[in-house]
Image (cartoon, rainbow, N blue to C red):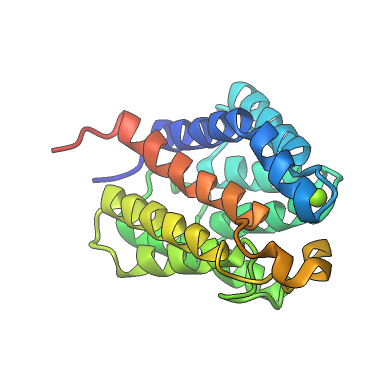
Amino acid sequence: MLLTKEDLFSMFRFVALLWQQNTLRLSEIDSRFGDGDHGVTIGKMAAMILSRLNERQDESVKDFIKSLGSGCLEIAGGSAGPLYGVLLEGLAGPLSDDDNEINAATLKAMFSSARSALFEITKARVGDKTLMDVLIPATEAAEKAPDDVLSILQAAAAAASLGLQETENQVSKFGRARNYGEKTLGTPDVGAVSTALLFKGFQCGAEEHIPQY
Ligand SMILES: [Mg+2]
């Protein structure tokens, strides 16, 4: 089973729609220990993805995903733009220009590459209450999943969801939220929420297109 270009478009469309549905919730969570703008930034990224889905259908999968990465990097507003820009550019890293269908091995390599790219720009690791608490377990689960694209996306989304839940039991160590220390217990990390939505969107978007048995 391969992910076609249409599957990929569907995956990013679902991510954008999930992000749009959750902008108010994301800003509410961010307002507790941050500046309350995460939903606004995520909403801008969702709009950018949806417009590029309409405009750039002719590009290769690699160029398309890279263009989403550079689109995020251009979005001002805290750290979310650069983090998601690097994450998406990392995803495109292992693709070659004529890779318009993605197999299990390539999908696993894309997730590993995204994680490596984030490792270059943040020192946050598991337990620090950031999006890395979702990205690291999700991409590791993807690597360990059976060599089937849907199984990989399902394993990643499930691990993302567990990683997100864990952030509620953690004390913030990065960003503005770290100033609130133990008060952050009981609230998930807002970047972890938007990253879990990313993996959920990938899974749901692929399931929409790939028949399940
Ligand atoms: Mg913020």
Give the number of callouts. Answer: 0
As drawn, 109 above or below 69: below
Q: Is residue 89 visible?
A: no
Of residues 141 and 129, the one drawn nearer to the viewer in this rendering: 129
Task: Tell me the residue at 65%/37% (across/down).
Answer: 25
Residue 144, image x, y percentages? 31, 70
Residue 183, image x, y percentages? 72, 65
In the picture, residue 175 is in which quadrant?
bottom right
Q: Is residue 24 visible?
A: yes
Task: Tell me the residue at 52%/42% (across/down).
Answer: 61
Quadrant position of the C terminus in the picture: top left
As drawn, 111 above or below 75: below
Of residues 39 and 8, the one drawn nearer to the viewer in this rendering: 39
- Please indicate whether residue 120 sits to the left or right of residue 153 in the image: right
As drawn, 69 above or below 188: above
Residue 72, image x, y percentages? 74, 45
Task: Tell me the residue at 55%/27% (across/down).
Answer: 57
Farthest residue in the top direction? 54
In the picture, residue 83 is in which quadrant?
bottom right
As drawn, 60 above or below 103: above
Of residues 173 and 32, the one drawn nearer to the viewer in this rendering: 32
Residue 40, image x, y percentages? 77, 36
- Please indicate whether residue 176 sits to the left or right of residue 48 in the image: right
